[in-house]
Amino acid sequence: MEGPHRPGRAGSEPDARWLDADEQRAWRAYLRMQGRLAARLNRELQHESGLSLADYEVLVQLTDTPEARLRPFELQSGLQWEQSRLSHHLSRMRRRGLVEREECSADGRGAFVVLTEKGRQAITAAAPGHVGVVRRFFFDGLTREEVAVLERLTTRILDLLADSGAETGDDAG
Amino acid sequence: MEGPHRPGRAGSEPDARWLDADEQRAWRAYLRMQGRLAARLNRELQHESGLSLADYEVLVQLTDTPEARLRPFELQSGLQWEQSRLSHHLSRMRRRGLVEREECSADGRGAFVVLTEKGRQAITAAAPGHVGVVRRFFFDGLTREEVAVLERLTTRILDLLADSGAETGDDAG
DNA sequence: TGAGAATAAATGATGCGTCATGTATGTTGA
DNA sequence: TCAACATACATGACGCATCATTTATTCTCA
C-alpha cells in the first residue's frame, strides 16, 4: 500500500512530478482494492473448488476449444503468460490430474495439453461459484456507467503498457 | 485471463446469473490490465533499484514515521497484510540489511522494525523512478475525471470486500 | 492469583511467478 | 547441405504469499 511518495528529498534531481492529493488517494485506493480483490477471489475459488484463479483460466481456455486440447504456445498467447510460468503451471496441473500431456506428431518439439475428465468436472463445478464471487465483490459495487468507464480506462492503460514494452509478463496470483 | 464463463452447463443449478457481454469485456480487460500493470511496476522497480513493490511499501511506511521504527503489528495494520506474510517479508528485508530488529522493552512479545541507513538510501533512490513509472503507465492514460471515477469505484469495491470478510489478505506481487 | 483467552510474532511446508539457462527440433539461405 | 538462427518447451534457483501451527507474553476476571 501507500503509493509513491516523497521520502526525504535531499538532492535535486530532474523531479518526476510527484502525485497530487487526488492522484495519491486514487492510487492508494486502487492498489489496495486490487490486492484485496485478487486475494479474495483466489481464496474463495480455492476454497470452494480447489482451483486457483490461474487454474481456472487455463481450464477456460481448454474448454473453449472444440477438442479441449491445445499446444502450450497457443495457451500462452491466449493467456498472455510468460512461457516458463505456463510450463511450470502445466506441470503442477498435470500432477494434479487436471490436464494430460500428449505428444505432437507434427512438431517434434511440441506437445498437446489435453483436458482430462477430472479437469472438466473441476471447472464445471467451479464456474457458477466463481461468477457469483465476481458479481458479489465487483459488479455489485458498480453502476453500468462505471463499468463502461472502467473498460475504457483499463483498455487505455493496456495500450500504454503495450507500447514501450514487448515483454510478456502478466496476471496476478 | 478469460473471465468467468459458461462451461457445459449440464445440470440446472440456482444459476448465479452469468456476466453479460459488457461485463465480460470489462472484467477481462480489468484482469489483464491489473496483471500486466503489477508485473510492469514490479519489474521496473526491481530492475532500477533492486526493490520489490512490497519492499517499497514497507519502506514507505517506515519513512512516514518520525523515528523510522514501528512495531510489526503497526506495519501490518498500515499495509493490511497478512501477519505471516509480513513476518516472512521482514526476515528477508532484514537479511538484505534494509531494516533491523530491536527488542521492545515495553512488551516482551514484541519488537521494533527499524529503518537502516541502507534502507533509507534505497527508497530515496527508488522513489522518483517509481513515481515516474506510475505516471507513465497509469495516470498518463487517464483524465482527471476518470481518476475521480476510479477512486469512487475502487473505494466502493473495497467496502464490498470489507463487509462479509473479516480476513486480512491483501496486495499483489 | 491463577486458569483461560487474547495478542505479538516466528516458522515450516507448499504453491506460485520470474529469471536465467538448457535442450531439442525446425527453418532458412548461402 | 549444413551452419546459423529461431521456435517450443523444460528446468533449477530463488523470492514471494498463504496456510497451519507454535511459542512467548500479556490480559481478564472469577
Image (spheres, coloured by chain):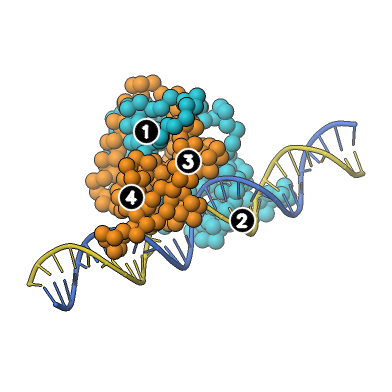
Chain colours: A cyan, B orange, C blue, D yellow
Q: Is residue A132 left or right of residue A94?
A: left
Q: Please, which chain is the residue tagged with disc 1 on?
A: A
Query: Which of disc 2 and disc 1 is earlier in sequence?
Result: 1
Disc 3 residue type? Answer: Gln
- Per the model, the C-alpha gap separating discs 4 and 2 is 51 Å
Name the residue located 56 percent from the left edge and 40 percent from the top edge.
B47
Q: Are marks 3 and 1 on the same chain?
A: no
Residue B162 image offset from top left, x and y in percent: 26, 45
Image: A76 above or below B113: above
- Secondary structure state at the residue bearing disc 2: strand
Residue at image position (59%, 51%) is: A87
Is residue B118 visible in this depiction of the protein? yes
Q: Are marks 1 and 2 on the same chain?
A: yes
Could you say whether the residue bearing mark 4 is in a helix, strand or loop?
strand
Circle 2 packing at 10 Å, graded few (<14), some (14-19), many (20+), is some
Mark 2 lies on residue: A101
Disc 3 from disc 1: Cα separation: 24 Å
Q: Which residue is mark 4?
A: B70
Residue nearest the observer in this picture, C13 or B108: B108
Badge 3 crowding class, 10 Å Cα cut-off, few under 14, some 14 to 19, many 20 or more, is few
C-alpha gap between disc 3 and disc 2: 49 Å
Tell us which disc is closer to us: 3 or 2.
Answer: 3
Chain to which the residue tagged by mark 2 belongs:
A
Q: Name the residue carrying label 1.
A: A27
Image height of D14 relative to A64, above or below: below
Q: Which mark is residue B121?
A: 3
The kind of residue tagged 2 is Arg
Please state which amino acid type lies under the numbered disc 1: Trp
**Cα–Cα gap, marks 1 and 4:** 24 Å
The lab-note entry on whether marks 4 and 2 share a chain reads no
